[in-house]
């Protein structure tokens, strides 16, 4: 299967969350902010120097550092614009 | 009274960026108070809601949080208040605010709050926005599923506020339906035992106590060990329980939403996405940010000028009139020369504070602030800072006091402390007069290449401050390596028009906090400094004054000259003068004599006092603004041991470096104390900055002379 982590998806790429690493407090925070398996995220923009990244999830935009995005395992659903 | 069942203390809770402050402001207006939660740096905001014929209702504005799990200080406050662990702050009912166009997260928190079993009501804010984006909520059904009354508002426009007020006035709050079944998380018997041990009736509140019993040492030792024993007995694991609860709760929330939320359109956050294309552009995003900061900084610098001069004149006049009207004596002197100028020294900062926070409130309210954090985060990280540090640091160019107050928005403790610690290195506007006088002494006006030479020197001084700040931040990051750095996980909210009322109230509140909290310390120190500069041991002062040659005639010039000489003699004979001579051996290696020593001591009040002290010491008697007179006089000062001018290049550079790096600002000390709630940080900071300044000046002087 074509799994990767959220920090590696491309601009405007749609991906579905497969799994969230909740072993640390950041992972738990992400789950409280809506990063749940089954949800779709889109990478909207990356900051200068490529970090942090801004994702669209539900009706909000959430910025994550790359290290934080690594906790999210995703599967590309390639609806890229 | 007609309101037997009205709740008199209501807590306002909600996730960030849902317009909670706007609703708080709409309910309470100017009847707000900012206080402290003991042992934590989060402000305690309370307000009074008044309706005719109703006894006042106290509203507690809790910080915005995504959940009730106490990780950050903000969350600790919410957790403590709602679990009854905060003495003197006991909520009787809870008003939950949620964003109607982003209900999932809002309801997650709401369902936690409802489970705490307070009488609760839910406000769905930003109704206009939600409708525009095609969200349609079946409120009747939602209200039935949650078991609490629901209000819809567009608080920015004032829509729905009337009904909300009416609801609060009539006590329309109900204990809602429990969202999740606690027996799925842990043993029901465990909950019962915890309820018995803690005396808490509500099962979910009891579970929270069990999960977070170690939190902030709020639970007393005995109960804590009993709870730990219970957890051990039932094999209860807090982290696992929390994870399970989160999963169950989300399931429940989604189930509710699937029944009562319809999204009819696709126009979601469209304007915001378009604006972000420009404002977060990898290339010009940064330039736009810097341009905004530049405008902000320039405006604080220039717009505050006028009001500051007025305040200055007003207090000078007040002091003069007091001295004239009251019988002369020690008490009048204390009032007119100690207390009134001291008060003036506090109030003088109000324009800058109010302006900076007006800008910050606009940036925050428009949604841009989160973007500024987003684009600068990476650049700041190597220094142990994060994106939230940028605004305080840049504001430090105007004045460290509001800048340090602005550091409050940094959630991570380490990053916040480093930001507060290094911000005073940024060259603030009070250093400018000192720089101008001193640079003018050694650098002739004229151009070097295309630039004014003095301008280049001034620019170097600013660079020195930035370098000192960043290097110190780096050092602190290494020292504090045990403390975890911040995480980002930052919501970029929708762009919206900032709310004028919120902006005005922020200005008022910040100025108010500064005057009444940091102001006390500043006033106290300025009185001490005044006593040091106006009194001396025994008859010393009188002797010194008597020794000044009386004017030969009473022409105005002669009298003026005599008075100036008297002032110089008094200052020399005062405790400050003695101290100046006392520290002379210590500052001699920097090229300073006892006169500069006096200026260093008196200008601890504020750097710009250096100029007026120099004025008095050298009997210049010029207007403070008239730098050329001062420069002319200083350039004539001769070093008695060498016969050469005292203010040589080496001495002046040494002084410049000292003023760039030393703390020399009691208001900063006071505000750091206020923000960190301890004397430890301001003390370490003052010592550190003074040592850095001393060593740097020493190097500069020794290298140049």
Image (spheres, coloured by chain):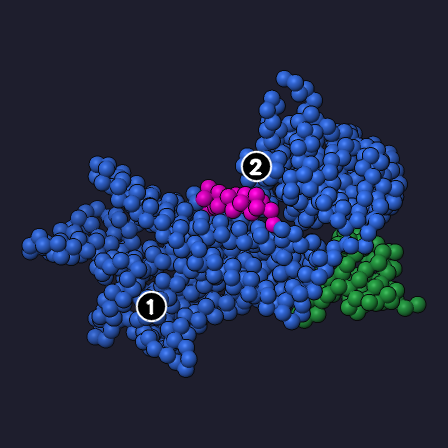
Q: What hue represents chain B?
A: blue
Outermost residue toward the bottom in this view:
B449
First in residue order: circle 2 vs circle 1: 2
Image x and y of residue B87, in percent = 62, 33
The residue under label 2 is B29
Residue B395 appears in view: yes
Q: Nearer the viewer, mark 2 or mark 1?
A: 2
Which secondary structure lies at badge 1?
helix
Dividing the picture into quadrants, the one containing residue B636 is: bottom left
Residue B6 or residue B561, whichever sits in front: B6
Image x and y of residue B256, in percent = 86, 41
The residue under label 1 is B438
Q: In the image, is B400 to the left or to the right of B218?
A: left
Q: What hue represents chain A?
A: green
Give, as a single range, the part of the protein colored magenta.
B498-518
Q: In the image, is B680 to the left or to the right of B577?
A: right
Q: In the image, is B482 to the left or to the right of B593?
A: right
Residue B613 or residue B225, whichever sits in front: B613
Q: Is residue B241 above or below residue B602?
A: above
Q: Is residue B34 above or below residue B672?
A: above
Q: Is residue B505 magenta?
A: yes
Residue B558 or residue B368, whichever sits in front: B368
Image x and y of residue B555, in percent = 9, 54
Q: Residue at x 81, y 60 (%)?
A: A41
**Measured Cα–Cα span from mark 2 to mark 1:** 48 Å
Q: Residue at x 24, y 36 (%)?
A: B326
């Amino acid at each position: 299967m074509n799994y990767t982590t959220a920090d590696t998806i491309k601009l405007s790429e749609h991906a579905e969350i497969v799994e969230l690493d909740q072993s640390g407090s950041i992972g738990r925070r992400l789950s409280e902010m809506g990063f749940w398996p089954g949800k779709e995220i889109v990478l909207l923009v990356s900051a200068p120097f490529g970090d942090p990244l801004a994702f669209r999830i539900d009706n909000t935009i959430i910025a994550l550092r790359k290290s934080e995005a690594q906790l999210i395992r995703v599967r590309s659903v390639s609806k890229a614009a | 009274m007609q309101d037997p069942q009205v709740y008199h203390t209501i807590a306002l809770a909600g996730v960030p960026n849902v317009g909670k402050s706007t609703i708080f402001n709409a309910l309470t207006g100017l009847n707000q108070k900012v206080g402290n939660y003991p042992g934590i740096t989060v402000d305690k905001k309370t307000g009074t809601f008044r309706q005719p014929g109703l006894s006042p209702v106290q509203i507690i504005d809790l910080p915005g949080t995504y959940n009730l799990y106490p990780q950050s200080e903000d969350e600790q406050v919410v957790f403590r208040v709602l679990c009854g662990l905060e003495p003197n702050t006991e909520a009787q009912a809870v008003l939950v605010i949620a964003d109607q166009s982003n209900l999932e997260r809002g309801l997650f928190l709401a369902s936690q709050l409802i489970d705490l079993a307070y009488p609760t009501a839910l406000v769905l804010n930003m109704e206009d926005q939600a409708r525009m984006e095609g969200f349609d909520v079946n409120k009747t059904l939602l209200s039935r599923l949650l078991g609490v009354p629901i209000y819809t508002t567009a608080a920015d426009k004032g829509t729905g506020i009337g009904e909300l007020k009416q609801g609060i006035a009539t006590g329309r709050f109900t204990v809602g339906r429990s969202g999740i079944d606690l027996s799925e998380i842990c043993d029901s018997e465990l909950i019962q035992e915890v309820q018995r041990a803690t005396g808490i009736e509500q099962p979910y509140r009891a579970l929270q106590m069990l999960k977070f019993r170690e939190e902030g040492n709020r639970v007393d030792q005995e109960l804590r060990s009993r709870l730990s024993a219970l957890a051990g007995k039932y094999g209860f694991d807090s982290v696992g329980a929390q994870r399970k609860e989160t999963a169950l709760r989300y399931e429940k929330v989604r189930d509710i939403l699937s029944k009562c939320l319809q999204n009819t359109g696709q126009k979601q956050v469209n304007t915001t996405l378009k604006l972000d294309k420009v404002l977060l552009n990898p290339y010009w995003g940064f330039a736009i940010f810097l341009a905004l900061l530049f405008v902000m900084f320039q405006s604080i610098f220039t717009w505050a000028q006028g009001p500051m001069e007025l305040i200055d004149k007003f207090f000078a006049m007040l002091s003069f009139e007091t001295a004239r009207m009251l019988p002369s004596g020690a008490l009048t002197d204390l009032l007119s020369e100690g207390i009134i100028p001291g008060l003036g020294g506090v109030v003088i900062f109000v324009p800058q504070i109010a302006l900076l926070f007006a800008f910050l409130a606009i940036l925050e309210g428009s949604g841009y602030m989160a973007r500024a954090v987003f684009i600068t985060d990476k650049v700041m990280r190597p220094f142990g800072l994060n994106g939230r540090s940028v605004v305080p640091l840049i504001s430090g160019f105007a004045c460290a006091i509001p800048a340090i107050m602005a550091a409050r928005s940094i959630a991570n403790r380490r990053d916040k402390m480093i930001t507060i610690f290094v911000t005073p290195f940024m060259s603030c506007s009070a250093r400018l007069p000192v720089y101008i006088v001193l640079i003018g002494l050694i650098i002739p006006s004229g151009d070097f290449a295309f630039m004014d030479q003095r301008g280049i020197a001034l620019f170097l001084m600013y660079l020195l401050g930035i370098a000192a700040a960043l290097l110190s931040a780096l050092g602190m990051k290494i020292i504090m390596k045990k403390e975890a750095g911040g995480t980002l996980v930052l919501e970029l909210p929708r762009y919206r028009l900032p709310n004028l009322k919120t902006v005005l109230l922020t200005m008022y509140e910040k100025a108010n906090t500064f005057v009444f909290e940091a102001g006390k310390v500043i006033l106290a120190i300025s009185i001490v400094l005044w006593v040091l500069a106006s009194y001396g041991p025994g008859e010393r002062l009188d002797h010194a004054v008597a020794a000044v040659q009386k004017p030969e005639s009473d022409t105005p010039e002669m009298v003026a000259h005599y008075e100036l000489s008297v002032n110089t003699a008094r200052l020399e004979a005062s405790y400050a003068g003695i101290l100046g001579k006392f520290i002379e051996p210590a500052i001699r290696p920097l090229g300073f004599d006892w006169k500069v020593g006096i200026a260093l001591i008196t200008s601890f009040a504020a750097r710009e006092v250096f100029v007026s002290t120099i004025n008095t010491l050298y009997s210049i008697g010029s207007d403070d603004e008239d730098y050329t007179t001062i420069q002319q006089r200083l350039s004539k000062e001769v070093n008695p041991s060498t016969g050469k001018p005292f203010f040589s290049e080496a001495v002046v550079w040494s002084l410049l470096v000292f003023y760039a790096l030393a703390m020399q600002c009691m208001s900063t000390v006071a505000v750091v104390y206020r923000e960190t709630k301890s004397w430890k940080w301001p003390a370490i900071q003052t010592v550190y900055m003074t040592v850095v300044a001393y060593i740097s000046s020493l190097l500069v002087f020794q290298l140049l002379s």
